[in-house]
Amino acid sequence: MTKSTSNDSDVLIRAGQHELHYWRDLWRYRELLYFLAWRDILVRYKQTIAGSAWALLRPLLNTIVFTVLFSRLGKFPSDGVPYPVLVLAGMVPWQLFSGAVLGATQSLVTNSNLISKVYFPRLIIPCSTLGVALVDFLFTFVLMIVVAAWYGVMPTVRLLALPLLALYALMASLGPSVLIAAMMVKFRDFKHVVPFLVQIGTFVCPVGYSSSSIPEKWRLLYSCNPMVGVIDGFRWAVHGGTPLHLPGFLISVGITLLLTFLGLWYFRRTERTFADVI
């Protein structure tokens, strides 16, 4: 709530008191979402030496490292497809998730002046960071298609499921992003913890290896990690090396929906205090 005073009257700007009004306000302020997202994209790609080439170079270097580490040294199975294709199919959704989480970490703190001066649904700020993550996602996806074609892995009808899987990956990114963004307002130490957790997550999630490497008795427990279902779904759609483990996939979807609900619930619960704390 923001109050501005003039000589004649006071103008009170109040957020929607009803939940329905909040989501209606979110739609009304959609242009602000587009503006913030576009601003972040411009800053990201204008202030780098390599420009957009870095968005291709980073996943390519990670693919080389994972191929050497897990395939050459660890002798992990490749599900009957070239190992670089296996890695890149897992790298595509992981880039979206990690980029969204890292971008959202300090998004509210960075935009503190905007939050303290004018009303708008604060959810717009962490959601706008998905713009940069989506651009990186597209670059990595193009790289994956090129590498798959190079190795002779041709697309099948399963590729039609990718739009739905991309939406699933976006939802898996949204919950943790808004949760971490809200917690960062009060607990600033998260800016040091989150990059470390994302780095660990690269190895905990099946980015550089296949989920088929996990013993069958642990598969359902392992699938409680929501990114397992996202990555397995992408690999099934891109190359179909192994059939999709449906029970584990459904568990990952359920955990994703739960985390999205919890993230949005915590954000809405603490949103009214942002201007005071920040």
Image: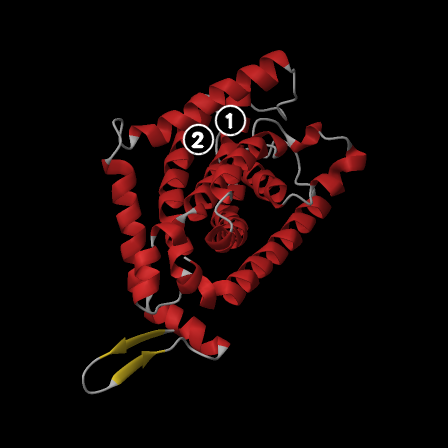
| Residue 26 percent coordinates (x, y) | 39, 68
**Residue placed at 38% from the left, 38% from the top?**
136
Could you give the CA–CA distance between mark 1 and mark 2, rounded to whole angstroms? 7 Å
**Residue 232 in which image quadrant:** top right
From this view, report whether residue 95 is shown above or below residue 116: above
Task: Find the residue positioned furthest to the right.
Answer: 217
Q: Residues within 10 Å of mark 1 (few under 14, many from 20)?
A: many
Near-viewer residue (215 or 201): 201
> How many numbered marks have been drawn onto this rendered protein structure?
2
On-image quarter of the N terminus: bottom left
Task: Find the residue positioned furthest to the top.
Answer: 73
Residue picked out by circle 2: 144
Q: Residues within 10 Å of mark 2 (few under 14, many from 20)?
A: many
The amino acid on which the numbered mark 1 sits, given as a three-letter code, is Val
User: Element type at marker 1?
Assistant: helix
**Residue placed at 27% from the left, 83% from the top?**
10
Task: Find the residue positioned furthest to the bottom.
Answer: 8
Q: Earlier in the sequence, mark 1 or mark 2?
A: 1
Q: Is residue 192 left or right of residue 42?
A: right
Residues at discs 1 and 2 in contact (Cβ within 8 Å): yes
Near-viewer residue (119 or 229): 119
Near-viewer residue (78 or 258): 258
Residue picked out by circle 1: 85
